[in-house]
Amino acid sequence: MTMFEELFALACSATLTMTVSADEKSGRLTVNVIPKPRQDAGEPGLTQPLSLTATPQEFDAGFIEALRGYREVRQSLAQQAEATKEVIEAAKASSVKKASDATVKAGASKSAPAKPVTAPAVSASGGSADDEEEDAALQAAGATPATAATAGGESFDLFG
């Protein structure tokens, strides 16, 4: 490819600004190729300028290869940035799906009708022959042995 073909290929993915300066004492040029990405403005690696300093003869011999290498690296960075973007978008979608599934499950368990719990009547003497079984039944129903419902639905505290 010629120099302008390489510049064209590079400019297809980014707007380019080029600066050229000369140092008369050393006989060298400095060429800066500064891309401004069109699509991937958030990727700092794609805005890294190419800055070369060499003699005019060295530029004639190697500038096209330098541009080609720079363009290929930029393409690789752009592909990596796009792949990373796709992975992040997929992770977001997966996270949203998991969260909505959990919300649906939580809503379904709250809306399921609760089974009414009936506690055995406690005698006025303070207990029955099967206190341990009653305690186990109350704990399974979500109550504690310290509180129980009487036959009339009133609750009382055994320790208070």
Image: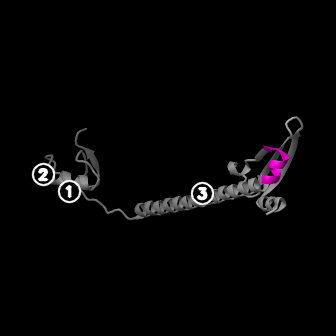
Q: Is residue 88 magenta?
A: no
| Type of amino acid at the residue the image marks with label 3 | Thr
Q: CA distance from mark 3 to mark 1?
A: 63 Å
Q: Which residue is mark 1?
A: 120
Within 10 Å of disc 1 (Cα), the crowding (few <14, some 14-19, many 20+) is some
Q: Quadrant of the N terminus?
A: bottom right
Q: Which residue is mark 2?
A: 128
Foreground tag (3 vs 1)? 3
Labels 3 and 1 touching (C-beta < 8 A): no
Q: Which residue is mark 3?
A: 84
Within 10 Å of disc 2 (Cα), the crowding (few <14, some 14-19, many 20+) is some
Instruction: Name the colouring of the figure.
Output: one colour
Secondary structure category for the residue under label 3: helix
Q: CA distance from mark 1 to mark 2?
A: 10 Å
* Farthest right residue in view: 24
Q: Position of residue 99 (x, y in %)?
A: 50, 59
* Farthest left residue in view: 129
Labels 3 and 2 touching (C-beta < 8 A): no
108 displayed left or right of 27: left
Span shown in magenta = 53-61
Whichever of callouts 1 and 2 sits on the residue coming sooner in the sequence is 1
* Farthest top residue in view: 25
Secondary structure category for the residue under label 2: loop
Q: Is residue 102 visible?
A: yes
Q: Is residue 58 magenta?
A: yes
Instruction: Depth check: give the residue in front, 58 or 36.
Output: 58
Q: Is residue 150 visible?
A: no
